[in-house]
Image (cartoon, rainbow, N blue to C red):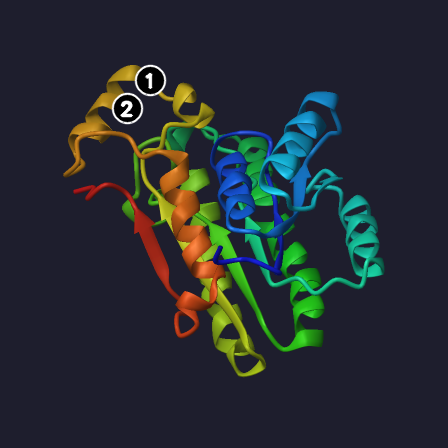
Amino acid sequence: MLMQGKTVLITGCRRGIGKAIVETFAAHGADIYAHARCEDKTFMAEMEFLSQKYSVDILPVFFDLTDKTAMQSAVRKIIAQNTPIDAVINNAGVAENSLFQMTSETQLRNQFEVNFFSVYFFCQYMVKIMLKNKKGSLINIASTAAEDGNPGKSAYGASKAALVAMTQSIASEMGHCGIRANVISPGITDTDMLQTMQANVVEDAINKTSLKRAGRPSEVADLALYLASDLSGYITGQVIRVDGGLK
């Protein structure tokens, strides 16, 4: 029960890594603000099921990350609850595969808008909440594409590389206030995003790992749990890969 009595906010909780993070944190006693872009009954039912299963509070929050006004409104509602936020996990993101010379301005701007600019502003809001309690763990989900220069990932990798640089600056600036900031960089992971990639590309990526398999969302969630908990109290400004020994 590493998060007993603590409250976390997680973005992009509808499926994949985000959904796994919600369940992992709930299993360890955290109360959760679970974000999704659009409200729907299925998502709310899933969150209610997990809430009852683990006897924690899970409050769904809905807003489009690219809508700054909606984001601010959601943050104000969270502030009104007067509940300290112990950890924020920015998981929501988009990925489009396109060769460098075929990437349009629209594709480039969309990936930066969701993967970087929206997270930048959301982190500003969340850090203000954490500053009131002089503690908190900020965890941003990037990608090994931010470092590895994968074919077809120039826009996506660049947006995630920007996220890495931002997170490390936050760690440097906010450490004296008790706020830690770290990055998790998943490699090939068994999520819906995997379905957007060609089968031969996926197979090649798996073969380049030491473990010869794709990662599981729960394995990324386990690292997020560690970085959010007091066990990682002296870890900040780090980029930790969950990539199965990708070479």
Image: 48 above or below 121: above
Instruction: Determine the CA span between mark 1 and mark 2.
Output: 6 Å
Q: Nearer the viewer, residue 222 or 139?
A: 222
Whether residue 143 is visible to the viewer of this picture, yes or no, is no
- The amino acid type, in three-letter code, at marker 1 is Gln
Can you tell which mark lies on residue 16?
A: none
The residue depicted at 39 percent of the width and 31 percent of the height is 101
Residue receiving disc 2: 202
The residue depicted at 41 percent of the width and 66 percent of the height is 231
Q: Give the x, y percent position of residue 53.
A: 59, 35
Q: Quadrant of the C terminus?
A: top left
- The amino acid type, in three-letter code, at marker 2 is Val
Secondary structure of residue under mark 2: helix
Q: Please, which residue is most extreme toward the top here?
A: 199
Whether residue 190 is visible to the viewer of this picture, yes or no, is yes
The residue depicted at 60 percent of the width and 31 percent of the height is 14
Mark count: 2
Q: Are marks 1 and 2 in contact (CB under 8 Å)?
A: yes
Q: Give the x, y percent position of residue 118.
A: 64, 49
Query: How crowded is the residue under tag 2: few (<14 C-alpha within 10 Å), some, or many (20+)?
Result: some
Residue receiving disc 1: 198
